[in-house]
Amino acid sequence: MINDKCSMLQLPKLILASGSPRRAEILRFVGWEFEKNVADVDEKEFFGEKPEDYVQRLAMAKAETVAANYENALILGADTIVVINTQIVGKPKDLDDARRMLKLLSGRWHEVFTGVALVKKEEKITPKSVADLQKTRVKFAELSAAEIRLLIEKGEPLDKAGAYAVQAQAALFIEEIQGDYWNVVGLPINLVYKLVNSL
């Protein structure tokens, strides 16, 4: 028999500072209430910037930009990149760039980095913020020209880091994942939960 005195876990409402449909989908999947307010930030890398610093800086920039529009809210920013041999592989500029990225990933391990940042704003209280990083290793099979063409034509690569979506056609060619699957989709939801609790 369920104890009536046990209260349900209450997840605080989030403001998602991202236009990513994957991040929104993950939040809906776990039943986390949120609204979107897309941040417009400069995503240029700083000279010599490490991938882990880059994604956390961008995640925080997104959260802080959106936080400026609220008096009382919990804002979530996130940024995801693919890294191969310390080289940052972001979203492709065009289909030729997507083809180049997929050839680079073919038959090799790479890492997916997601920076997650939270800014908590309360009236008359100094905002609190926290950021962290999730890393996942992913191994692609060797891709033929026809398989790359499938990912280009059917996988909608232009809005995805590394030009692929692990939960779509690319799943046919991924041999192994070491770490958080949801991180590869675009939002390490367990890390978000931990950071929310830390605030």
Image (cartoon, rainbow, N blue to C red):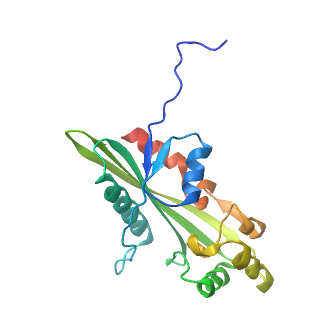
Query: Which is more toward the observer, 18 or 191?
Result: 18
Residue 28, given in percent of the width and then of the height, sits at: 58, 45
Residue 69, given in percent of the width and then of the height, sits at: 30, 52
In the picture, the quarter occupied by the N terminus is top right
Residue 48, given in percent of the width and then of the height, sits at: 36, 79
Above-or-below relation of 152 to 1: below
Query: Which is more toward the observer, 116 or 63?
Result: 63
In the picture, the quarter occupied by the C terminus is top left
Label tally: 0
The quadrant holding residue 156 is bottom right
Residue depicted at 78% across the width and 67% down the height: 172
Query: Which is more toward the observer, 195 or 77?
Result: 77
Residue depicted at 62% across the width and 45% down the height: 29
Q: Is residue 175 left or right of residue 42?
A: right
Q: Is residue 157 left or right of residue 150?
A: left
The quadrant holding residue 58 is bottom left
Query: Which is more toward the observer, 137 or 150?
Result: 150
Residue depicted at 42% across the width and 38% down the height: 197
Confirm whether residue 103 shows in the render.
yes
Confirm whether residue 107 shows in the render.
no
Q: Is residue 90 left or right of residue 61?
A: right
Above-or-below relation of 186 to 125: below
